[in-house]
Image (cartoon, helix red, strand yellow):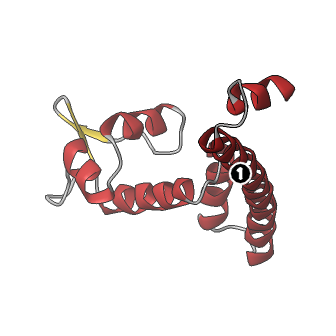
Amino acid sequence: MADSAIQIGELSRRTGCNIETIRYYERIGLMPTPARRGRYRSYGADEVARLGFVRRARELGFTLDEVRALLGLAAGGGATCAEVRDLAAAHLKDVRARIADLKRMERVLADSVRACDAGQDPGCPLIEALRAA
């Protein structure tokens, strides 16, 4: 391995990814099994770039399977921009559905907090809202 090889702690610092998460990604195949220097894992620039890609995709909410698909598409071969677009469009639809759910939750919670603040109900409005659901 080249002199530019780094250990897992440095990989973690460079990518902002937790060491246990890196090990997990290795176990599930998102990251390749690293070379070893003695008993230490040894990483190069390719692994830094790949982990950065995985981390950014996860920050955007892509599932592990979606990240795996994106990595496959990014690796080249017959991948087209249309395939990546289709994956992103499906993910966007899911994100928008979650946002709508969160907005509904916000309304219910805000109404419950307002009712609590008003103190007009003998019981707890939030508990009653949860019982009604």
Classify residue 78 by image quadrant.
bottom right
Residue 68 locus on image (x, y percent): 63, 49
The residue labelled by disc 1 is 102
Residue at the location (78% across, 32% down)? 129
Report the residue at 70% width, 37% height from top: 120
Q: Is residue 46 visible?
A: yes
**Relative vertical location of residue 31 with respect to residue 79 in this rendering, above or below:** above
* Quadrant of residue 81 within the rendered picture: bottom right
User: As rendered, which of 50 and 18 lies closer to the eye?
Assistant: 18
Report the side of 108 relative to 48 (left or right): right
Q: Which quadrant of the figure contains the C terminus? A: top right
What amino acid type should be assigned to the residue bearing mark 1?
Answer: Leu
Q: Residues within 10 Å of mark 1 (few under 14, many from 20)?
A: few
Q: Is residue 118 left or right of residue 48?
A: right
- Give whichever of 113, 38 is nearer the camera: 113
In the rendered structure, the answer to whether residue 50 lies left or right of residue 109 reads left
